[in-house]
């Protein structure tokens, strides 16, 4: 992204990329293709979970162990992190550094809170006797939600790196695309959880 | 300069923070409705279709507004929706193969 320039049009700063054959930013286009591949990845895991749903011959079963109130709160936390993410991007694009730092810090804290909820849930399930090898529910549940949690963890680390860049003053509006790409990743993780919350937790 | 900006969309073509906050509020309301539906026994028969519709609505809202597909080039949408469609087909196909068809053989 060395060729990125900046245009000062009314109301904000917009990163302008080098000319391409498509007229689109190749970094952003490539990242959308990557997210498309992630759809297939999580689609396969969700399909596996749905195939094994209610097929376990020994407990604990999903209806006995899933904690809807707790997961509803963690879902709310992840949704709020998505809101904070777009507010951070908006602040960077407008050159409002203080707002951007506060919003990005909010995303990181909310993401960490979501991971804490998941760690608590996994630990609770383990003490209730549900492990990866216990039954089909345990195998498919831990693999699906574990991979999602791993993606959230990667997102949190990525955002911490961007926060450091922001604190050092290395993210002017012209470099907002860097944060926009991280935001796309974060929102994708959010929409995957929207599906998981419905298919695993609410439809039992 | 940024503080004087009052239009609905700024120069990047993305919505303003007000739109983002309204969208966030709508997402929270939908989630609350989902959880409420789960606990209302009178809606048990409609639970699955209602939850699927609400979940799809949340998905679409995040993709269109927070991921900016409503405002960005349609090419981005095409490279995302095509594999998404394929993933949905995989899920439906697996459910039909392993859940629906075996039940039909037994009956």
Image (tube, coloured by chain):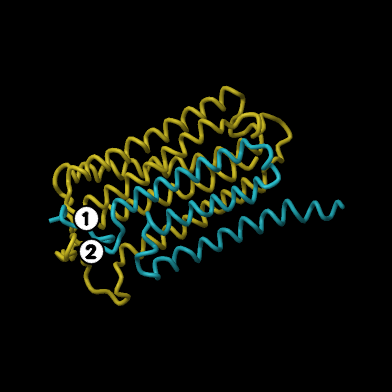
Chain colours: A yellow, B cyan
A117 lies left or right of A44: left
Q: How many marks?
A: 2
Q: Which residue is painted at 34% across and 53% down in the image?
A: B19
Task: Name the residue beneath numbered marker 2.
Answer: B11
B7 lies left or right of A204: left
Q: Nearer the viewer, residue A105 or A118?
A: A105
Q: Which mark is residue A93?
A: 1
Q: Which residue is painted at 65% across and 40% down in the image?
A: A204
Q: Nearer the viewer, residue B12 or A188?
A: B12
Furthest-bottom residue in this view: A21
- Place of residue B74 in the rendered image (x, y in percent of width and height, measured from the top left): 40, 70
Q: Nearer the viewer, residue B79 or A58?
A: B79
Front label number (1 vs 2): 2
Q: Which residue is painted at 29% across and 74% down in the image?
A: A23
- Place of residue B24 in the rendered image (x, y in percent of width and height, measured from the top left): 39, 47
A111 lies left or right of A118: left
Subunit bearing disc 2: B
Q: Residues within 10 Å of mark 2 (few under 14, many from 20)?
A: some
- Place of residue B42 in the rendered image (x, y in percent of width and height, measured from the top left): 69, 40
Proximity of marks 1 and 2: CB atoms separated by less than 8 Å: yes
Tag 1, which secondary structure?
helix
Q: Is residue B95 above or below residue A141?
A: below
Tell me the quarter of the picture where residue A25 sits.
Answer: bottom left
- Place of residue A124 in the rendered image (x, y in percent of width and height, measured from the top left): 54, 25
Subunit bearing disc 1: A
Q: Is residue A169 above or below residue B9?
A: above
Q: Residues within 10 Å of mark 1 (few under 14, many from 20)?
A: many
Tag 2, which secondary structure?
loop
Q: Measure how far apart labels 1 and 2 are at the Cα level.
A: 9 Å
């Amino acid at each position: 992204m060395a060729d990125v320039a900046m245009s000062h049009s009314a109301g904000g700063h917009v990163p302008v990329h080098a000319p391409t054959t498509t007229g689109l930013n190749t970094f952003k286009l490539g990242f959308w293709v990557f997210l498309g591949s992630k759809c297939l990845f999580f689609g396969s895991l969700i399909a596996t979970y749905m195939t094994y749903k209610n097929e376990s011959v020994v407990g604990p079963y999903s209806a006995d162990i899933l904690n809807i109130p707790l997961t509803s709160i963690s879902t709310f936390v992840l949704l709020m992190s998505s809101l904070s993410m777009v507010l951070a991007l908006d602040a960077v694009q407008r050159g409002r550094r203080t707002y951007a730092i506060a919003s990005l810090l909010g995303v990181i804290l909310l993401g960490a809170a979501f991971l804490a909820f998941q760690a608590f849930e996994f630990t609770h399930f383990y003490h209730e006797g549900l492990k990866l090898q216990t039954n089909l529910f345990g195998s498919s549940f831990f693999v699906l939600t574990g991979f999602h949690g791993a993606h959230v963890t990667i997102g949190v680390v990525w955002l911490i790196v961007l926060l450091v860049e922001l604190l050092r003053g290395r993210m002017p509006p012209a470099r907002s695309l860097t944060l926009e790409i991280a935001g796309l990743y974060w929102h994708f993780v959010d929409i995957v959880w929207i599906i998981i919350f419905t298919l695993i937790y609410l439809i039992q | 300069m940024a503080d004087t900006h009052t239009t609905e969309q700024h120069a990047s073509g993305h919505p303003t923070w007000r739109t983002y906050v309204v969208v966030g509020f709508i997402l929270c309301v939908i989630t609350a409705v989902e959880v409420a539906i789960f606990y209302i026994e009178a809606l048990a028969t409609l639970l699955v279709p209602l939850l699927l519709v609400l979940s799809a609505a949340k998905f679409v809202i995040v993709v269109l507004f927070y991921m900016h597909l409503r405002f960005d080039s349609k090419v981005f949408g095409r490279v995302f929706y095509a594999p998404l469609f394929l993933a949905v087909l995989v899920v439906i196909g697996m459910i039909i193969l392993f859940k629906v068809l075996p039940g039909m053989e037994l009956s």
